[in-house]
Image (tube, helix red, strand yellow):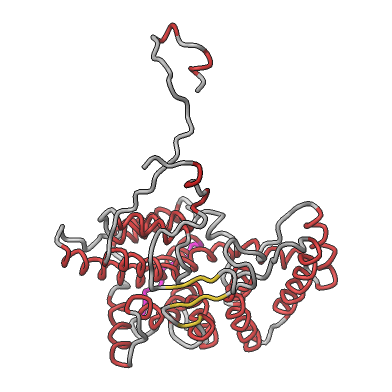
Amino acid sequence: MTPTASHFSPGLDGVVAARTAISDVDGHGGHLVVRGFAVEDVAPKVTFEEMVFLLWHDALPENGARDRFREDLVDHRQVEDHTLHLLKEAAARAVHPMDALRMTCASLVSRDTGPHKASAVAAAGQDALRLVAVFPVLVAAYHRLLHGLETVAPRSDLSQAANFLYMLRGEEAPESFVRALDTYWNTVADHGLNASTFTARVIVSTDSDVISAVTGAVGALKGRLHGGAPGPALNLVFEVGTADRAETVLREKLGRGERLMGFGHRVYRTRDPRADVLGTAAQRLFDEQGDREIYELARAVEACALDLLREHTPSRVLQTNVEFYTALVLHGLGFPASLFTPVFAAARVAGWTAHCLEQIAANRLFRPESMYVGARNRTWRPAGQRAVSEQRR
């Protein structure tokens, strides 16, 4: 069928391209359901390992299965020499952390062993384990190398979150930090058919391997319109500086037509439910740290921003989104802004791999139509007879 104007949807808005049982994003109601659980009910209570198991297997693990799954992840944490060499070369050239993650992800060797369905499914599961296990290791190792520090070997007795914090600092983090990172990773592990998840599903639908699919997803996440917003959201808080300046600074920004980072979402037409989960996590983290100054400032900026947005755009509902409290939680954990998107990737790889496994189980190659809007009925001429207008086309 030749597509017509009625079939064209810029950005694929409103187009249903997949059926999934992984997560349901209700933008109008402000709900996120992950494998049947409201995100606010499950994210603060389970470990990241349990969340990954839930995404892949549609059930929370019992004790024995949980322990075996954790051991499987630990067994896949080691980085091969060629990947470590690539990390060191990237750090020597001060490569952007997301570029380094994309490069090293691509360096992983897939377990894909051939065209047979059974072997492909088994290989996909092994690739998925490898990716989820190693992403935090790659991020932590590269961050240390980039700052002239020796890498820290992963420990087999620590959870995903605890091991990541240990590899970053070289010492164990307090339990409050581990719980905060678990909650953050659980909250952002999957979010429907977003740009990077769609990228992963498209790649794996070609019968390519899961590592290739996730490499493409990392490339999509690097984009400023997808994974790059938490840093600017924190910058907004720092720019305000003190609560008494909030209205002046924010009103001036809105007057110049600037966007207030951390507010509004392409999907959610009400408050982003993930913001509530991370808002609670941030409050608990800063309570336990004993330093609430930045937290109180962020809350003051949020309250002022919401008031001004209601006044400035009364016809649109612009509420706090996940980036605002992501920035606060990650700052509370001591992460610099350069780590925000790679740390996000270390969580979202769980969702990417879950969607890859789901796509493989009932695959159909993605092959959308495009609408041609170029010239027609042009005539070839030798080089000396071509009009200037044709040469410029």
Residue 68 visible in the snapshot: yes
Residue 54 spot, x, y in % from top left: 37, 80
Residue at horizontal 45%, vertical 39%? 371
Secondary structure, magenta segment, majority class? loop
- Above or below: residue 376 compared with residue 259: above
Name the quadrant of the N terminus: top left
Residue 49 spot, x, y in % from top left: 38, 81
Residue at the extreme top of the image, as rendered = 384
Residue at horizontal 34%, vertical 58%? 213
Q: Is 288 left, or right, of 347 in this rendering?
A: right
Residue 187 spot, x, y in % from top left: 51, 76
Would you say residue 37 sits in the magenta stretch? no
Residue 348 spot, x, y in % from top left: 44, 68
Q: Is 327 left, or right, of 153 in this rendering?
A: right
- Looking at the image, how many numbered discs can be counted on the residues? 0
Q: Quadrant of residue 138?
A: bottom left
- Above or below: residue 25 compared with residue 159: above
Q: Is 353 left, or right, of 43 in this rendering?
A: left
Magenta range is: 147-155
